[in-house]
Amino acid sequence: MNLFTGEEADAFFGGEVPPAVRHLVDEARSKPREEAAVALWTAVLASPQALPVYYLLYKLHAGQGELAQAQRAAERGLSAAAAVAGLPSDWRQVRPGMADFLQPGAARFWLFTLKAQAFILLRRGEPAQVAERLEHLRLLDPADHMGASVVAQLLAQHDVGVRPTTSGC
């Protein structure tokens, strides 16, 4: 079952969850939010290359309005995805052609997590950091396959004093 939708699914965004930490993810599904977060952070510590766990964490924290924790999870997820995909650790140094960002895998997860970071930063009220990430997303994904234009629209609304109301990443 998907931790956030309640739908039956064994697939996770970002790839497979290693068996060594699968029980922690399964445990998180049946626990209250606070205990779910503890189980997922434990999974990250036990298997830092398990990309889906970062996604679950930043979605969980962002959905609860815990934006500092969501940002921390996204930062760590971005770093882990860069390592798995063979990308530079500094997202600003990633250039088109360094990876195939459209194929399922670590590079696509990296690009999606950069977008998630932009959204989280928008909700935190950090528009300059959002704009910086959006500019980089446009460079890496000019056809907007990841949907960064949605975050750009929210940023434009934010810049004219309209607060975004959506809570997803």
Image (spheres, rainbow, N blue to C red):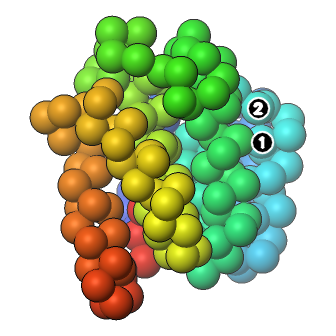
**According to the image, label 1 marks what residue?**
44
Residue 132 shown left or right of residue 88 in the figure: left
Q: Position of residue 60 (x, y in %)?
A: 59, 67
Residue at 34% in and 90% down:
161
Image marks 1 and 2: residues in contact by CB distance under 8 Å? yes
Total marks placed: 2
In percent of width and height, residue 43 lies at 78, 44
Q: Residue furthest left?
A: 143
20 or 72: nearer the viewer: 72
Q: Position of residue 115 (x, y in %)?
A: 41, 49
Residue at figure coordinates x 70%, y 41% from the top left: 76
Which image quarter is the C terminus in?
bottom left
Amino acid type, label 1: Val
Write the residue at 33% across / 9% down: 97
Please tell me how crowded label 2 is: few (under 14), some (14-19), or many (20+) other residues with Cα within 10 Å: some
Q: Is residue 81 visible?
A: no
Name the one closer to the observer, 162 or 16: 162
Q: Secondary structure at mark 2?
A: loop
Residue type, numbered disc 2: Pro
Q: Disc 1 and disc 2: Cα gap in Å?
A: 5 Å
- Where does residue 98 sit, x and y in percent of width and height? 41, 9
Considering the numbered disc 1 on the image, is that residue within a helix, a strand or a loop?
helix
Q: Is residue 156 left or right of residue 71?
A: left
State whether residue 15 is above or below residue 167: above
Label 1 neighbour load within 10 Å: few <14, some 14-19, many 20+: many
**Is the residue 150 above or below the residue 145 in the image?**
below
Instruction: Examine the image and state in which quarter residue 27 appears.
Output: bottom right
Q: State whether residue 37 appears in this view.
A: yes
Residue 146: mark in rendering = none
Q: Is residue 122 above or below residue 89?
A: below
Q: Which residue is mark 2?
A: 48
